[in-house]
Every structure is written in C-alpha cells, then in structure tokens.
Amino acid sequence: MRHLLHLALTLAVIAGTGILWITYVPSAASFLDRVGVAGFLRVEPAQAEKSGGRGGWGGGGPTQVVTATVTDAETSDVVEAIGDGEALRSAILRTEVGGEVVEVNHTTGGRVKAGTVILQLSAEAERIEVERAELSLQDARDEVERMSSLQGTGSVSEVRLREARLALRTAELDLREAAYELDRRSIRAPFDGEIGLIDIVVGDRMSAGEEVTSLTDRSEVLVDFRVPERAIGLLELGMTFEARPLGFAGAPLEGTIRAVDGVVNRRSRTMRVQGKLDNSLDRLRVGMAFSVVLRFPGETLAAVNPLAVQWGSEGSFVWVVRDGTAQRVYVGIRQRDADRVLIAGDIAPGEKVVVEGVQSLRPGAEVAIAQEDASLRADVDSQDRERENPT
C-alpha cells in the first residue's frame, strides 16, 4: 500500500509540473504540437496565448525572428565516374620488310609531321630496280612513238602497235612496283603526333613486322568512362562534363561527349561513353585516370536556407512569414546541397522563411523580423554565379 501511495504522489507531482509548464511556458504548446502529442493532450495553440504566451526575445509582443529570402534553383542529377585517358589517334610503327638500319632520324621522341621519315632501311637494291624500270619505261615510250609515226605509211600493222602500247603499260606498272618496294624501306609517320622513344641504332638488323616506336596524337585526349543505365536517356552528343586528373590538383577541365555506345553491359548495367578534352597546353597524357562528373539539369524549385527546414509529426515544414504572422507550410525535400535545400510546396521565391527563432513559433503567431539573414542569401547567390560561370 505504501508503494502505491508513493507512486500516486510521484505521478501527481509530474502531472502538476506538466500543467504548470504548459500554462506558463509560451513555447510548450508549439513544442507539443511539433512532436505530435498536442492533440492527444488536448492542448491547442490558442491555449498558449491565453496562458500568457510571450513574444520571443523581448518578453511581450510579436516573436522576434531572423529570416532568409526564398530563391529558386534547378535540381541536378549528378553522375560520377572514373575514366581512362586515350590518345585521339595512336599507332605502333613497324617495319614492313627486313633489312639493315642505315638512318635513324629521331631517337629521343618529339613531335613529327605526317610523312616524316623516322627510320630508313638499306635500299640500294630497290633503287637499282627503280632505275631499271625507268629505263624500260623510256624504251617502251620510244617504241610506241616510232610505231605510231610509221602506222600512216602502212609499214606497221595494228597488231604490232597494240603490242607496243601494251609493253608501255607493263613498263609503267613495273616502275610503280619498284617505287613501292623502295618506299617500304622507309618508316614514315602516318599523321602528326608525338613519337615514343626509339631503342634502335644505325647498323641494327630488323625483321619484317618488328616494332620501331609508337606515335600518338594527343592534341585532344579522349576519356573513356561508364555511366549507369538510368542516365542513358539524358545523354546527348556534345553535352559538357567536368574532368579532374587524379594525378595532380587543379581546376576541373571541361570536356564534351564525343560518342555513346549503343549496348548496355548486362553485368554492370552500365554503358560506355567517350568524351574529349582539349590538350593544347600538352599537360595531359595517354593512360591518365580522370574523375568525371556529369550534371543533368532538372526542374526549377524553391530553394531555402537549410536552417529553415523543420520536422514534425507530419513531415518536413518551414515557417513562412505572411502578413506579419508565421505560417507553417509543409514541404517535400527534393535535393540537399551544402548551402541550400530545394523544396516543393506552397511556397514561392521572394517569400521570407524563418531561420532563427523557430522554437517559439506557432501557426498564426505574430512575428517581427529582427534581422534578414542577407549573408546567407548572398552565399547562395554567389554559389549560383559560380555554377553558371565556372572557372
């Protein structure tokens, strides 16, 4: 019996303390309303006013609050990936025929023009064949001219003239073949680019198909990366992306999408994308790894300071100042950034939301704006400008 008496007294003390708190503490009703038990305890917001609810920071009167202006911003779907750098064009230069090396024009790499002879094999026999073919061609031409001049006299038949012309054509083909064989003894650059190191010296003997060096055109660097299939419908040729070389720090580079594969990998559910980066400063190299960021614009929504977003039993909401009173507006959060939250609800850009003093607010309570937090709004505006004009 004694224990029951102690329990009853304890409950009575707790209940009395709660009644006094609700009656004399202005923010009690709004707190109970936020946690969702005001209706259960039958505590109405008006009850707080009747029980001496006071304004926020200065005692009686309207609640003093700090506000921020609602702006608008676009949601963005961000896709991040790791890409590999590749040359715009790349080739391994090899010998077509075997022979002794008689000339090496480049030994330490460097940039070359298309058609530059990089390595020369011995070609004396091929030059002799070219000269022999030139003599045969000249002899065939002279024969055709002689036959043509005699045809009018009737001393040369049509058959002999046709045979002479056929011999001329054969001599022309022999000269082309000899010149082709001579040209195969020279290793030339097929396009403008940078050659790799050459570990070959004059006097070396090379076999057919042996590697001489590499040639790459890195005036632009291609970046191969993969995106999830959810982003496939958003990709367009020519759209921009950000890329950062993982090997060194610095501002992100801007590239454009050059090609999109047409097949989704069944295992990874991703698709290959190829972009290109300008490399006019020649800082990028083939084989580099890049951190790639794709940003896809979305819908335009209201943007508020993160401090303005509150939570209650029915979800997230903000306090909006309308006609000098605080109005609770429930909103849906669409995107969170470091400096702002994008929300959807009955709220428009230009309205004022409370960022400080929310603890003492209740629906319909009079408020006085003690300060508009312009610094926060300026930060958001500067972030917008940085996104629109990246450096």
Image (cartoon, rainbow, N blue to C red):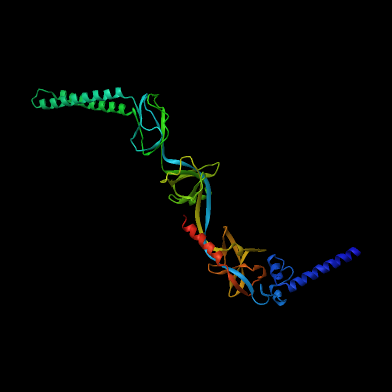
Say which residue appears at 77% left-offset and 71% top-offset: 19
Where residue 255 appears, as percent x and y from the top left, is 45, 49
Please say if 232 is above or below 338. above
Residue at left offset 44%, top offset 43% = 221
Is residue 6 shown left or right of residue 127?
right
Q: Is 349 displayed left or right of 193 in the figure?
A: right
Q: Residue furthest right?
A: 1
Residue 71 drawn at (x, y percent): 53, 65
Estimate the x, y position of residue 128 in percent, counting from the top left. 27, 23
Instruction: Name the quarter where the N terminus is drawn.
Output: bottom right
Q: Where is residue 222 in the image (x, y as percent from the top left)?
A: 44, 43
Labels in figure, total: 0
Question: What residue occupies the far left of the structure in this picture?
Answer: 153
Horizontal side of residue 281 vs 16, given as left or right: left
Front-most of residues 376 and 225: 376
Q: Is residue 42 above or below residue 335?
A: below
**Is residue 11 found left or right of 152 in the rendered image?**
right
The image quadrant that residue 331 belongs to is bottom right
Q: Determine if residue 91 is in view.
A: no
Q: Can residue 124 be seen in this view?
A: yes
> Is 263 above or below relative to 356?
above
Corner quadrant of residue 357? bottom right
Taking depth in this image into account, of 98 and 11 the one nearest to the observer is 98
When the figure is inspected, residue 389 is found, relative to residue 355, above or below; the finding is above
